[in-house]
Image (tube, rainbow, N blue to C red):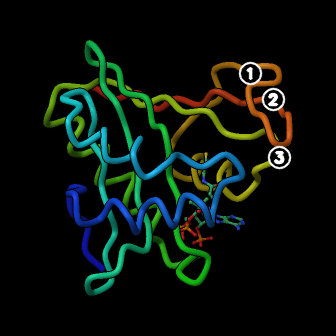
Amino acid sequence: MRIVEMTGEHVPQIAGLEQLCFSDPWSERSIASELDNDLALWLVALEGQTAVGYVGSQTVLGETDMMNLAVHPDFRRKGIAASLVRELVQRLKDRGSRCLTLEVRASNQPAQALYTSLGFAQVGRRPNYYQHPKEDGLILRKEWEL
Ligand SMILES: CC(C)(COP(=O)(O)OP(=O)(O)OC[C@H]1O[C@@H](n2cnc3c(N)ncnc32)[C@H](O)[C@@H]1OP(=O)(O)O)[C@@H](O)C(=O)NCCC(=O)NCCS
């Protein structure tokens, strides 16, 4: 497995993973538009030429939001998501970002276990943040020294 920055050739596969992993997926067009967004950094985990996971982020004034993280069901519990987030944090440090914030469904225990293991802490809760189904979002954050 290797981790690379997203390029146009990865977009259709990432859109497929979005459909597979989320009830409210980003469209292929929305994902492609991130390639033209100077604030965005998306990383892709590749097995050969196949995208098996990805993480998307956006940084404004030294603070980063993680928008999506997913790994193909057949490739889970192999450390791919943890590697993607660690690599993202390293690259964000290099770009001068000081923290990474994300929302996670209150019922999403696997993702919460992942984030806790990576040093994220809960800093808030957004009632009814998610649709399909409606659910609260927990706000988690990881901060570091530059
Ligand atoms: C959440 C998700 C990204 C995790 O991907 P992954 O590659 O399987 O995660 P990793 O293998 O890197 O897991 C690292 C650690 O996270 C925790 N973890 C991950 N999945 C878990 C699960 N199903 N149950 C309990 N803990 C879990 C464990 O501590 C794990 O370490 P371990 O395997 O040594 O016990 C994946 O399950 C996924 O794509 N889910 C659907 C989309 C989603 O919910 N994304 C997050 C939105 S906020």
Q: For this view, does 127 lie left or right of residue 50? A: right
- Look at the numbered discs 2 and 1 and tell me whether their residues touch, using CB distance below 8 Å: yes
Q: CA distance from mark 2 to mark 3?
A: 9 Å
Q: Earlier in the sequence, mark 2 or mark 3?
A: 3
- Look at the numbered discs 3 and 1 and tell me whether their residues touch, using CB distance below 8 Å: no
Name the image quarter holding the N terminus: bottom left
Look at mark 2 in the image and give the residue it sits on.
Answer: 136
Place residue 49 in its image quadrant: bottom left
Q: Earlier in the sequence, mark 2 or mark 1?
A: 1
Q: Secondary structure at mark 1?
A: strand
Name the one closer to the observer, 68 or 14.
14
Q: For this view, does 22 lie left or right of residue 1? A: right
If the picture is divided into quarters, which one holds ligand 1? bottom right
* Residue 76 % position (x, y): 57, 76
Q: Amino acid at mark 3?
A: Ser
Q: Amino acid at mark 1?
A: Arg
* Residue 22 % position (x, y): 66, 54
Name the residue located 30 percent from the left edge and 48 percent from the top edge. Answer: 42
Q: Amino acid at mark 2?
A: Asp
Q: CA distance from mark 3 to mark 1?
A: 13 Å
Mark 1 CB within 8 Å of ligand 1: no
The label number, if any, that marks residue 125 in the structure image: 1
Look at mark 3 in the image and give the residue it sits on.
Answer: 107
